[in-house]
Amino acid sequence: MNFQQLRSIREASRRGYNLTEVANVLFTSQPGVSRQIRELEEELGVEIFERNGKRLTGLTDPGKGILQIIDRLLLEAENLQQASREYSGRKTGTLAVATTHTQARYVLPKVVQTFRSAFPEVRIALQQSSPEHIAEWVLSGKADIGIATEGLSQFEDLISFPCYQWSHVIVVPEGHPLLSHTPISLEDLAAYSLITYDVGFTGRGHIDDAFKRAGIATDIVLTAMDSDVIQQYVALGLGVGIVASMAIEHNHGKGLQAIEATHLFAPNVTRLAVRRGAYLRSYTYDFILQFAPELKRSDIENALSAGGQ
């Protein structure tokens, strides 16, 4: 039994049993992956995968249990490597942070700046995507930390912590008729074409839920992942924007005005997630506490310890 065999099993499950993709991820050949899988099955005396001819189609019942053990073994091997670097006193490495554009653009710059001053030899890799992909990257070990909205709490193998609460605001060009509505209603808002986030991004679910509960149809004419892009198209007069409050707080000079919307849409909670049972380097804790000062290292350690049992 060796780690390459274990990685072949794990990646086959992750990659939808496509051995070509597995081979690319593991920098080997497809026949090599097939051999690693077959050798481990022969050593264990059990079929891990269901097959249709030579093609893998799924996990057998024993394979499902074996995969859980393999995941734990590989996680502990990664933890051992992280611990060895930590205890050897090395303050070098790469901290991979998966997050949304809004967090990377508006919230993280000061955190990254402070972190880099404290750990100048640690590289930071910011990876931007949807909350679903962020969770997948943390679960797979591609990212050390995930930062997004409430969706991160839905993954059993992630431990997530609430960090701060924020709201959506409405943005319109100067002189827009909605500026005279006090307070603005969902009916007022739905009378105009809307521009907001893609589904799954930056609290979009709370926007949709508000209109759905009120039974109000909307005309969302343009969506984007990027708050700056949304505001650019609002400035061009293509519609009324709904963006995260921190986006409008940091942007000036676009000829836009913000309208309070806390009474219209439910508040959002940004969460930070790490993989359950993972070993975190000291500088990872430092980054987390810079981002969420209300957290304590002992709380994180206790959650990881309990999560790894």
Image (tube, helix red, strand yellow):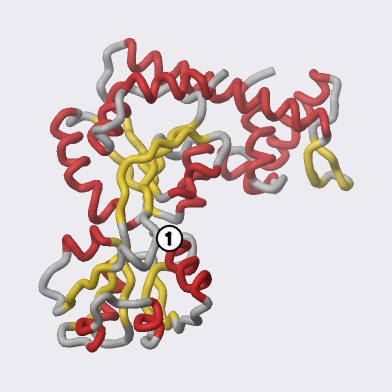
**Helix, strand or loop at disc 1?**
loop
Q: Could you say which is closer to the camera, residue 286 or residue 209?
A: 209
In this image, 257 relative to 145: left or right?
A: left
Quadrant in the rendering for residue 262: bottom left
Q: Position of residue 308 (x, y in %)?
A: 54, 21
The quadrant of the rendering that contains the C terminus is top right
Task: Identify residue for label 1.
Answer: 201
| Amino acid type indicated by mark 1 | Phe
The quadrant of the rendering that contains the N terminus is top right
The structure residue drawn at horizontal position 32% and vertical position 29%, both measured from the top left corner, is 284
Q: Position of residue 195 (x, y in %)?
A: 36, 77
Q: Could you say which is closer to the camera, residue 65 or residue 23?
A: 65
How packed is label 1: few (under 14 Cα within 10 Å), some, or many (20 or more)? many
Single out the residue that lies furthest toward the front: 182
In this image, 159 relative to 293: left or right?
A: right
Compared with 132, 48 (above or below) is above
The structure residue drawn at horizontal position 78% and vertical position 31%, both measured from the top left corner, is 63
Q: Could you say which is closer to the camera, residue 213 or residue 160?
A: 213
Q: Position of residue 225 (x, y in %)?
A: 38, 65
The structure residue drawn at horizontal position 45% and vertical position 84%, both measured from the top left corner, is 219
